[in-house]
Amino acid sequence: MIVLSLFNGMNTGRQALENVGIKVDKYYSSEIKPYAIELTQHHFPDTIQVGDVTKWREWNIDWKTIDLVLSGSPCQDLSAAGKRVGINGNKSSLFFVFIEILEHIKSLNSKVLFFQENVGSANKLDIGIMSRALGVYPCRINSSLLTAQLRDRYYWSNIRTKEDGMFGDIITDIPQPKDKGLLFQDVLTSGYTDRKKARAVLESEERQLVNKDKLYKRYTELGMINLVFDNPQFLPNNNVRILNKIELCRLQGFTDNYCDILTRNHAASLLGDGWTLPII
């Protein structure tokens, strides 16, 4: 299989293919974050880096040979955690670059497969726009079924589809996985949590304030961040911490040492933006 991965991030797609035993002959990666590229090349040094997705017409690729296109186009303008600008926002509108690339490959290879992911809190109007552009409606899976975090996501693919509804809409036919029952407490290296499941890992966790009082206030008032307490009474202030690198990896289904070459903050950035490995 020859694969093109757009917005490649920490290379979850390649790791997933490896885990299920699919042989990859060539893997093209479009990514611009230096530490994302560093992690990718560390685990899969044969990865071919092609650079900025907006410059795809300059890439040296035999487009008709591409078997699979992976895309996790940016969700920042779609997510409830952002400003909800929508699919036409500066970052999330890169989805349409993915569509340009996919349509170009389809014109040369009509059998090309694709897999696209985006955030579950996106506006339904935006999901409709994306679905019509792809010609298939998504399935919706929460990472909480296979990990210890709440991470609601849409997945579009033509790998397996079926007709649904009165008008025979084409939908992505990926079944819901069986719930493994993993809890937030299960992934902690030390300490305690008062939540059954972690909130979704966010890139912003790398920029959390050091002040423990402000951390705890954000935890109780906004609920978006993940905190660990050093006692089972869940006392605030100096008795709380943010997640460490091992815990972040576990929440996304990676091995404890997967991000060893990165700083904690760079790992948080990539894991927060990335895909949940066991789901993929």
Image (tube, rainbow, N blue to C red):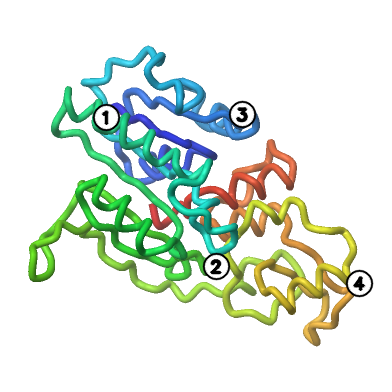
- Counting residues from the N terminus, which is met first, the one under dot 1 or under dot 2? 1
Labels 1, 4: front one? 4
- Is residue 61 rendered to the left or right of residue 44? left
- Counting residues from the N terminus, which is met first, the one under dot 2 or under dot 3? 3
Q: Please name whichever residue, 48 or 136, is drawn nearer the observer in this view of the structure.
A: 136
Task: Verify CB contact (< 8 Å) between mark 2 and mark 3.
Answer: no
Q: Secondary structure at mark 4?
A: helix
Reading the image, the residue beneath label 4 is 238
Number of dots carrying numbers: 4
Residue under the point 37% across and 12% down? 60
Q: Report the disc number at residue 38.
A: 3
Residue under the point 50% across and 64% down? 151
Task: Verify CB contact (< 8 Å) between mark 1 and mark 3.
Answer: no
The location of residue 12, given as percent across then percent down, is 47, 43
- Give the Cα distance between marks 1 and 2: 32 Å
Kindly indicate the quadrant of the structure image that contains residue 143: bottom left
Task: Indicate the amino acid at tag 4.
Answer: Asn
Reading the image, the residue beneath label 2 is 149
Reading the image, the residue beneath label 1 is 1
- Give the Cα distance between marks 4 and 3: 35 Å
Q: Secondary structure at mark 2?
A: loop
The location of residue 55, given as percent across then percent down, is 45, 21
> Is the residue marked by circle 3 packed among few (<14), some (14-19), or many (20+) residues within 10 Å?
some
Labels 1, 2: front one? 2
- Give the Cα distance between marks 1 and 4: 51 Å
User: With respect to residue 3, does 249 lie above or below?
Assistant: below
